[in-house]
Amino acid sequence: MGYPAKLLAPGEVIKFETRPHWRALFAPGIIFLATVIGLVVLLSWFASNLPGWEWLRWLFVAGGLFIVILWALLPFLRWITTDYVFTDRRIIVRSGIISRRGKDIPLSKVNNVSFEVPPMGRVLNYGALLIQSAGENDGLTVKDVPDVEQMQRSIYEYIESDEKRRRGNE
């Protein structure tokens, strides 16, 4: 993964970085497999039962490619281009395939960090971090965070360390 060091402030250290939980790839993987298997079965049936209908085969291939690109490849690209970075000074979220979107919250502005874990998140160990900041914005919701409860505890530790650093006690 490796968040670029050139994008960090002088002396800033990455404490933890991750991508959304792998479960975000489960449905696209199922769609990909079902589409490929369905196309193979359909095309083999066409080859044996409907000779001379090649244009119809190409229509099914085009439809299959459309499904794979829209519901399998794009979610994978969104997953692989999303970064959650927690440094000793701020929380950074970056996402986007072609254009990038980002949001940073300095640890000094964080008022509260809570989490939500859906029922499946209890089984697969993921959830959403809800970060409230002292700024004018609505805060930040970081979805699909692996091991969200541990991450919440870690953020509070990072906040305490940042306060000590800013006071000059460290």
Image (cartoon, grey):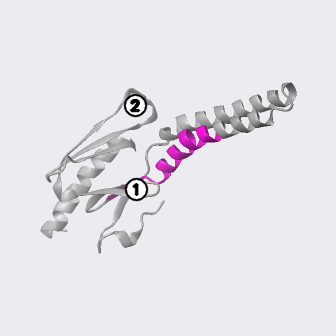
- Amino acid beneath label 1: Glu
Residue 11 position within the rendered picture, expressed as x and y whole percent measured from the top left: 29, 73
Residue span colored magenta = 65-86
Residue 92 visible in image: no
Residue 121 position within the rendered picture, expressed as x and y whole percent measured from the top left: 40, 33
Residue 17 numbered mark, or none: 1
Q: Alpha carbon of mark 2 to alpha carbon of mark 1: how far?
A: 21 Å
Label 2 close to label 1 by CB (< 8 Å): no
Which residue is pictured at 67% across the width and 40% down the height? 62
Nearer to me, 116 or 154: 116
Which residue is pictured at 22% across the width and 57% down the height? 107
Relative to residue 15, is residue 147 depicted above or below?
Answer: above
- Farthest residue toward the bottom? 10
Residue 169 position within the rendered picture, expressed as x and y whole percent measured from the top left: 15, 68
Residue 91 position within the rendered picture, expressed as x and y whole percent measured from the top left: 29, 56
Q: How many marks?
A: 2
Which residue bears the numbered disc 2? 122
Label 1: which secondary element: strand
